[in-house]
Image (cartoon, rainbow, N blue to C red):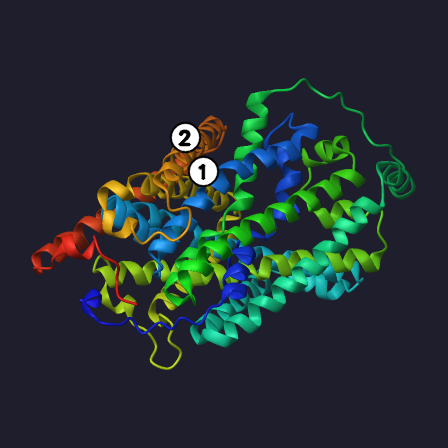
């Protein structure tokens, strides 16, 4: 059994910068360029309340982030979220929450890989490379390129160590630099400039729309949608087995990722809405898919438009290495505990990466790419991810709430915000706020008028929960029959 080994074979090679980059790159992707504007369609009536909804969405994300940071300081191991819940609540609940997280993130990796190609196509269009743009519209070419990009980053993750860092950190810097162009451009132009450009280009005026009265329901619905933008910082916790000075660097990296990304989101979104009237965005979103580059393209020159489209493509690309790291370490942790096939816990003797888990995660993401290509609907995967992560974050807060009582030995290892007097209100508020967001999200999904039941992410999530339950009970029963001391396994930390 893998958990009986003295060492895992993983190396603690990720410093603070690499850990923070892992969280930041997992959080910043398609969301920043699409969700703050397409929310005008998904939450009708949100109008000018997008920024307040963003701030409200940050509250449960910050609470979950604090819970992760506290737990990470006590249990710095690969597959963080699974380890936290299995050691403070029960291995079944830990597996259930982390399996949904793994499934949703794996599908999301496939979605991201598939939607990268249209952004590259838009760069070709902006540069007037029509033949290349037409080629990228071809179904077989798009599928082939999507899979090539995915497996390129699977290869980078397999090699691990320095190659991972040398890929991720420059991508992060480039993404921030190109995103800064959007911020400066958005605040450099005003809505009068946009109205003039719209009239000059298309001969039409900005539509007028009255500002509706304040609606708490609309604000909460908008915040639940925008919460998706904060998913990803948990990738830092999954890398806990490879972090240098983990008790310090894991919590600090989580704080940097949430704080940095939250500020960037607000500046980015505020800049676009400063230049583009929300009335125009709301009207266009009803019948068109909008992006930040497309909206600012009305006032920017073609050269600057190419730069911000390329920035959006890079924001998507840098999701992949960090998310692949996260999902593979979850599988590794399950196998290490003996509730998943032992082969998945193998570590490459030269690269010191869980190569079997990485390849399996790449295979699952490939299924996500193929699903997008043949089904033609990738937003379902995003909704499934949001449901899974709201549940997972709630379980993390519940883990913090109960750790002192259920596993006092591990609770003593906490290095940040040590006082239980802080833990209880923080975790309790996290459980309540995340639970409320989950109810709002599920209610919105079930109320949607869709063609078939399987287009509702809630029913698919419940099927994933059922699959996770079957896997756990089969493997747990096998573990018991083998004579393993399950009390010891699930009350102590795995080896380093």
The image quarter in which residue 113 lies: bottom right
Instruction: Measuring from the top left, give residue 329's x and y in whole percent.
Output: 37, 62
> Residue at horizontal 80%, vertical 45%?
187
Residues 379 and 72: in front is: 72
Mark 2 sits on what residue? 432
Task: Report whether 127 appears left or right of 200.
Answer: left
Mark closest to the chain's N terminus, 2 or 1 = 2
Task: Report whether 318 appears left or right of 423.
Answer: right
Give the structural element (helix, strand or loop) at label 1. Answer: helix
Name the outermost residue toward the top. Answer: 213
What quarter of the picture does the C terminus occupy?
A: bottom left
Residue 225, compared with residue 230, is above or below; it is above
Instruction: Measuring from the top left, give residue 328's x and y in whole percent.
Output: 38, 62
Residues 189 and 361: in front is: 189
Mark 1 sits on what residue? 455
Task: Report whether 162 appears left or right of 317.
Answer: left
């Amino acid at each position: 059994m893998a958990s009986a080994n003295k060492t895992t074979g993983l190396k603690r090679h990720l410093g603070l910068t690499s850990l923070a980059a892992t969280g930041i790159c997992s959080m910043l992707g398609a969301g920043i360029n699409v969700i703050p504007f397409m929310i005008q369609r998904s939450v009708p009536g949100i109008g000018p309340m997008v920024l307040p909804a963003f701030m409200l969405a940050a509250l449960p994300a910050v609470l979950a982030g604090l819970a992760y940071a506290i737990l990470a300081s006590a249990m710095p191991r690969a597959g963080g979220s699974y380890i936290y819940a299995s050691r403070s609540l029960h291995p079944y609940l830990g597996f259930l929450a982390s399996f949904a997280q793994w499934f949703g993130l794996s599908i999301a990796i496939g979605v991201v890989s598939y939607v990268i190609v249209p952004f590259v196509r838009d760069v070709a269009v902006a540069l007037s490379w029509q033949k290349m743009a037409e080629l990228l519209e071809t179904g077989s070419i798009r599928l082939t390129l999507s899979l090539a990009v995915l497996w390129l980053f699977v290869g980078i993750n397999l090699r691990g160590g320095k190659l991972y860092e040398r890929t991720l950190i420059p991508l992060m810097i480039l993404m921030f630099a190109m995103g800064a162009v959007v911020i400066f451009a958005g605040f450099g132009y005003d809505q009068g400039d946009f109205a003039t450009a719209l009239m000059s280009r298309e001969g039409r005026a900005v539509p007028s729309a009255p500002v509706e009265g304040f609606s708490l329901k609309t604000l909460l619905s908008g915040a639940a949608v925008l919460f998706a933008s904060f998913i990803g910082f948990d990738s830092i916790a999954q890398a806990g087995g490879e972090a240098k000075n983990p008790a310090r660097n894991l919590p600090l990296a989580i704080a940097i990722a949430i704080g940095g990304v939250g500020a960037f989101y607000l500046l980015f979104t505020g800049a676009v809405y400063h230049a583009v009237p929300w009335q125009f965005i709301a009207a266009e979103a009803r019948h068109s898919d909008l992006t930040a580059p497309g909206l600012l393209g009305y006032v920017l020159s073609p050269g600057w438009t190419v730069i911000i489209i390329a920035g959006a493509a890079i924001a998507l690309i840098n999701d992949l290495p960090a998310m692949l790291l996260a999902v593979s370490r979850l599988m590794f942790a399950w196998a290490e505990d003996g509730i998943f096939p032992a082969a998945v816990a193998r570590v490459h003797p030269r690269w010191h990466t869980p190569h079997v888990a990485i390849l399996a995660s790449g295979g699952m993401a490939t299924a996500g790419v193929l699903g997008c290509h043949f089904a033609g609907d990738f937003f379902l995967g995003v909704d499934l991810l949001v449901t899974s992560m709201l549940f997972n974050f709630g379980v993390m807060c519940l883990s913090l709430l109960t750790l002192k009582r259920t596993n006092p030995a591990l609770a003593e290892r906490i290095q940040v915000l040590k006082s239980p007097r802080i833990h209880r209100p923080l975790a309790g508020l996290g459980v309540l706020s995340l639970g409320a967001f989950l109810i709002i999200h599920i209610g919105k999904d079930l109320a949607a008028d869709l063609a078939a039941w399987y287009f509702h992410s809630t029913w698919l999530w419940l099927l994933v929960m059922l699959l996770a339950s079957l896997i756990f009970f089969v493997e747990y029963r096998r573990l018991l029959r083998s004579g393993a001391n399950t009390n010891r396994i699930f009350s102590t930390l795995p080896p380093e």
